[in-house]
Image (cartoon, rainbow, N blue to C red):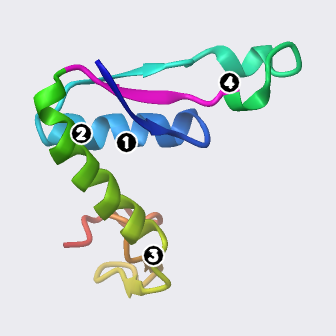
Amino acid sequence: MKRLYTAADLTEAYLMRDMLADAGIRSRILNEHAQGGTGEIPFTQAYPELWIEREQDLERARKLVTEFEARTNSDVYVDCPRCGEENPDNFETCWHCGLPLD
């Protein structure tokens, strides 16, 4: 296994794991429960980490992470065609009504 990504929190780690799974890349989250030890261990040791199970998937996984990070830093918004709510460009579904934002 190879470490791919250190997430800011568990939500981000699960999001990344699911994104990789959709691409057929198997991964695991390590330090999933380590945040409870913050104070006893350095906080940098408690961040959730995403590890790739097969080394041959590492480069493709890195590319997906780079694309994801570029989308999360976007200041572009789109309006939902159903309810008209404004959604960040990196959302796949409307936060308000759940319609896919293709």
Q: Quadrant of residue 2?
A: top left
The residue tagged 4 is: 45
- In this rendering, the label closer to the viewer, 4 or 3: 4
C-alpha distance separating marks 1 and 2? 6 Å
Three-letter code, disc 4? Gln
Three-letter code, disc 1? Met
Query: Which circle's residue, 2 or 4, is located before the other in the chain?
Result: 2
Q: x, y (%) of residue 95?
A: 46, 63
Three-letter code, disc 2? Leu
Query: In the shown orientation, is residue 10 left or right of residue 77?
Result: right
In the image, residue 33 above or below residue 62 = above
- Mark 3 surroundings: few (<14), some (14-19) or many (≥20) residues within 10 A: some
Q: Which mark is residue 16?
A: 1
The quadrant the C terminus occupies is: bottom left
Residue 72: within the magenta?
no
Residue 48: within the magenta?
yes
C-alpha distance separating marks 1 and 4? 19 Å
The residue tagged 2 is: 20
Query: Which circle's residue, 1 or 4, is located before the other in the chain?
Result: 1
Mark 1 element type: helix
- The answer to whether marks 1 and 2 mark residues whose Cβ atoms lie closer than 8 Å is yes
In the image, residue 21 above or below residue 89 = above
C-alpha distance separating marks 1 and 3? 18 Å
Query: In the shown orientation, is residue 32 left or right of residue 66?
Result: right
Query: Which circle's residue, 4 or 3, is located before the other in the chain?
Result: 4
Query: Which circle's residue, 1 or 3, is located before the other in the chain?
Result: 1
C-alpha distance separating marks 4 and 3? 31 Å
- In this rendering, the label closer to the viewer, 2 or 4: 4
Query: In the shown orientation, is residue 63 left or right of residue 15?
Result: left
Q: Quadrant of residue 18?
A: top left
